[in-house]
Image (cartoon, rainbow, N blue to C red):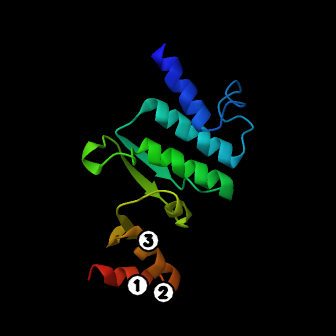
Amino acid sequence: GKSEEVIARIVEEAHMGDLIDRDINYGFSGGEIKRSELMQLLAQQPHLALLDEPESGVDLVNIALIGELINELLQKEHPIRDRRRSGLIITHTGYILDYVNARTGYVMLDGTIVCEGDPHEILETIKNKDYEECRRCLK
């Protein structure tokens, strides 16, 4: 039926066909685990997805694929007004920003949001200056 078709499409997009008959995440590499987790999220279609360091422990090839899956999960191919899903992506490196079109970035220091703005600009500021420059952002 339709459910089987959706699952088959998700498995193919996540490049998980050769792993689908194995126990979930058992013996998987870092990239395979991340792809498996995103595949499960795509099947669940949540309204809000929390993604903690999706690029952590993942090689460059898999980061690109993970970015594609996140974009699909968050319906990035649709105009903003037509999207029905949102995501919060936590990153310490910012590498995922090369593959995911994030609209707004925030910096949290000592449990407080100290800066918000264009995620690429924030990352550049941190790379070129440091996190302390972010503290000046909202002052």
Amino acid at the residue labelled 1: Glu
Amino acid at the residue labelled 2: Lys
x, y percent for residue 14: 60, 38
Amino acid at the residue labelled 3: His
Q: Earlier in the sequence, mark 3 or mark 1?
A: 3
Mark 1, secondary structure of its residue: helix
Q: Earlier in the sequence, mark 3 or mark 2?
A: 3
Q: Is residue 84 left or right of residue 75?
A: left
x, y percent for residue 100: 47, 56
x, y percent for residue 109: 41, 72
Mark 3, secondary structure of its residue: helix
Identify the residue at horizontal 67%, vertical 27% (top origin): 20
**Residue hosting label 2:** 129
The residue carrying pointer 2 sits among few (fewer than 14), some (14 to 19) or many (20 or more) residues within 10 Å by Cα, namely few
What quarter of the picture does the C terminus occupy?
bottom left
**Residue hosting label 3:** 120
Q: Residue furthest top?
A: 1
Does the image show residue 58?
no
**Residue hosting label 1:** 133
* C-alpha span from label 3 to label 1: 15 Å
Could you say which quadrant of the image residue 61 lies in? Answer: bottom right
Q: Nearer the viewer, residue 77 or 111?
A: 77
* C-alpha span from label 2 to label 1: 6 Å
The residue carrying pointer 1 sits among few (fewer than 14), some (14 to 19) or many (20 or more) residues within 10 Å by Cα, namely some
Do the CB atoms of the residues marked 2 and 1 lie less than 8 Å apart? yes
Mark 2, secondary structure of its residue: loop
